[in-house]
Image (cartoon, helix red, strand yellow):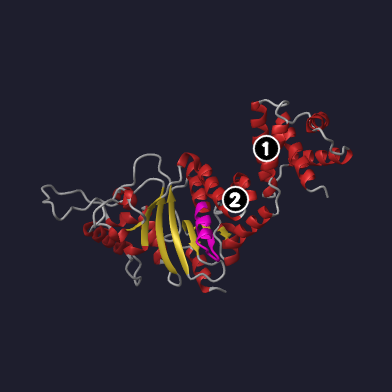
Amino acid sequence: MNAALQEIVLALSDPLAVETGGSHNQKGIEFQKNWAIVKMFALKDSDAVDFLFLFEAIQDVAVLDSSTSPASIEVFQVKKKDRNEWTWASLTHLHVPYEPSKNATRKKKTKPLDSISDSPIGKLFGSLAGLKTLSASGRFISNAGCDLKLGSGGNAATSLPVAISALPPHFTDLLQSALDSVQKPGHPRSDLSKVLLERVDIPVDDAQTYTIGIVHKFLDKTSPKHAGQARSFVESLLAKLGPLGTNTVKATTIEEMKSRHGFSFYELNHALGDLQQTTDVDFHLNEWLVELRDSLTFWEKTQIRTAFSGIYTRKLIGSPLPMDIEISESCDTWLAANPMGPSLVSMFDMALAHLRAEHSGVKLHELQAHFLLKAIEKCVDPS
C-alpha cells in the first residue's frame, strides 16, 4: 500500500483538508472541468510521464505526479468570477492591515484571525497542513486577477503566477498570524511560498470553446488527421469528468478514491489511443454535406451537425441512448440490404424514407445524422 496515497485517503475525512464551502453553480463546474483538461494537456506538452487528477477530494482539484507512487501533490482552488477582481478580503476573509509608512489617524476595524479558515486561501493552507508524506503546494486559480500589491512593486492581477510570500510584509505578517491561530498543535508553520495566485485566460461564458482550441492545437501537432475531432473528444472528456467528485460518501480506500474522484494519465492516453483508431468522421461529414448541398438548407445542415455531434459523443463515451441503438440497428439493416451506389443523394433519400417509416416519432435531422454516421463508418470500414 502506497503511504502517500493512503495519506490522501485519510485526508478526505479531515474537514481542514477538503472543500466544505459553498457549491459551484453550473458555470463554475464547467470552468473547473475545462481548466482541468487544459491543465492535463499542458502536462502532456511538458512531457509528464504520469499524473492523477482528483476532483472534489482535496479542495476543488488536486494533481499528483503519479497515480501509483506519488512524490508531490499540487492542490487547487479553481474559482470563476463574473465581475471585478479578487480582493484581499475575498481571498482571506481578513481586514486590510495598516501600511506602516502611513500614519494611522483612525482605528481600523479588524476581523477575527480565525476568519481565515473559511476563505479560499485559508482552505488551501489547511489542506497542505495535513500532507506530510508528499511535497505539497497550492494554487488559487481564477479567470479574474487578484488585486493585491506586491512587495517589490506591481500587482498580482497583472503578473505571472505569484507566491503569497511576495506580498508586502504587513500583509504576510497578518496572514501568518491568522494561519498560526488556526493551526493544529504540533504542526509546522505554514510556508507562504507554497501557495500561488494565478489568473488564467479561460473565458467563463465559453470555457469549452477555449478548451477545444487547446486540444485542437495538441492534436494538430501529434495527430493532424484527428485534429478535426477535437470538439467531440473534449465533449467526451467532459462527460467522463462530470461524475467525478459528485459522490458524497467519503472514500475509505485508495481504489475507492481513484474510482470516485480520479482521472489518470493512463486514462487520458487510453482516450487518445482510442481516438487514433477512430475514423475522422467530422472530416467525412463535411464532404458528404457538400455533396448534399442541393438537398439541404443551411438550417438543416446546422441541425444535422448538432445531432451528429451528440450521437457521436455518446458513442465515444459508451453511453448511447436507447433510441441511438434502435436507429443505428435500423441503419445497419438498410445498408446491408442496399449496396452503396454512385449517388449519395439518391441513397440518402431512400434511406430516410425507410427510417421515417420505422421511427416516425423521431425528428428528421436526428434520423439524417444517424444515417450519415453509419454510412460513413461503413464506407470507411466495409467489413
Q: Under tag 2, what secondary structure?
A: helix
Residue 31 on the magenta span? no
Residue 326 visible in the picture:
yes
* Mark 1 crowd level (few <14, some 14–19, many ≥20, 10 Å Cα): few
Dot label at residue 237: 2
Q: Look at 32% across and 55% down and name the residue there.
A: 116
Q: Mark 1: which amino acid? A: Asn
Quarter where residue 294 is shown: top right
Q: Earlier in the sequence, mark 2 or mark 1?
A: 2
Dot label at residue 286: 1
Left or right for 110, reference 357: left
Q: Under tag 1, what secondary structure?
A: helix
Q: Return the x and y of residue 357 as percentages of the image width and height.
A: 83, 29
Quarter where residue 293 is shown: top right
Q: 169 and 15: which one is in front?
A: 169
Q: Mark 2: which amino acid? A: Leu
Left or right for 306, reference 136: right
Q: Return the x and y of residue 115 as percentages of the image width and height.
A: 31, 54
Where 20 falls versus 74 (above or below)? above
Quarter of the image that includes the N terminus:
bottom right
Left or right for 122, reference 238: left
Magenta-drawn segment: 38-53
